[in-house]
Amino acid sequence: MREQFQTSFVDPALRGTSLQSLINHLLRHSLSDLLRQSDSSVMNEIPANLNLAIDENKVTPVIKELLTTVLNNARKGRIHIRADRFRDIIILEIEDQSNYNGYALEYSVRSIEPLARMVGGYISIKGKQQLDTTISFSFPNQETGLSYDC
């Protein structure tokens, strides 16, 4: 008998997708080669109980592209990932504490903005001229979603 693998990150006790688990999955599976190539360390500091109320398939492509972009532009990076919930909005922050080319990183991040807007989200970047650069992705965390133009 074949074993069924869980494809969702829903914790039945918590109801919703664990953002921490989603990012861990991306880093271990989809982005593991890129992580090795960049010779970077990633600290996932998202609380285990921070869950998505929306369908994970809506925000996963944006999160994956952001992580890919950060790792593509990192060399021996010290990357910290954090998230907070404010009412019906989640703000995901990806901070590279050893950024060496902020302008290239910003250019790459800007190309992801249309994808973020499609899910009602917004991307910002701060510190592109400094060693410590933070990319923020804020998006609605409710079943129906918020719709706003940026």
Image (tube, rainbow, N blue to C red):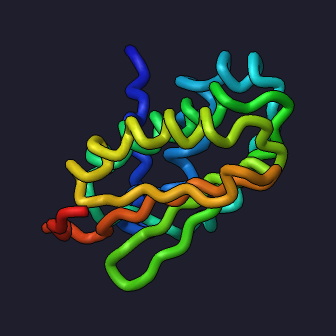
Residue at position x 18%, y 63% from top? 149
Which percent across, then down, holds residue 26? 54, 34
- Would you say 58 lies left or right of 3 here? left
Please tell me whether residue 93 is drawn above or below residue 57 in the rendered image: below
Please tell me whether residue 60 is drawn above or below residue 82 in the rendered image: above
Residue at position x 35%, y 63% from top? 139
Which percent across, then down, holds residue 144? 14, 67
In the picture, the quarter occupied by the N terminus is top left
Please tell me whether residue 71 is drawn above or below residue 45 in the rendered image: above
In front of the other: 96 or 144: 96
- Would you say 114 lies left or right of 3 here? left
How many numbered circles are shown?
0
Which percent across, then down, holds residue 77? 81, 38
In front of the other: 38 or 127: 127
In front of the other: 71 or 55: 71
Q: Quadrant of residue 148?
A: bottom left
Residue at position x 32%, y 68% from top? 141
Which percent across, then down, holds residue 15? 36, 66
- Would you say 49 lies left or right of 113 here? right
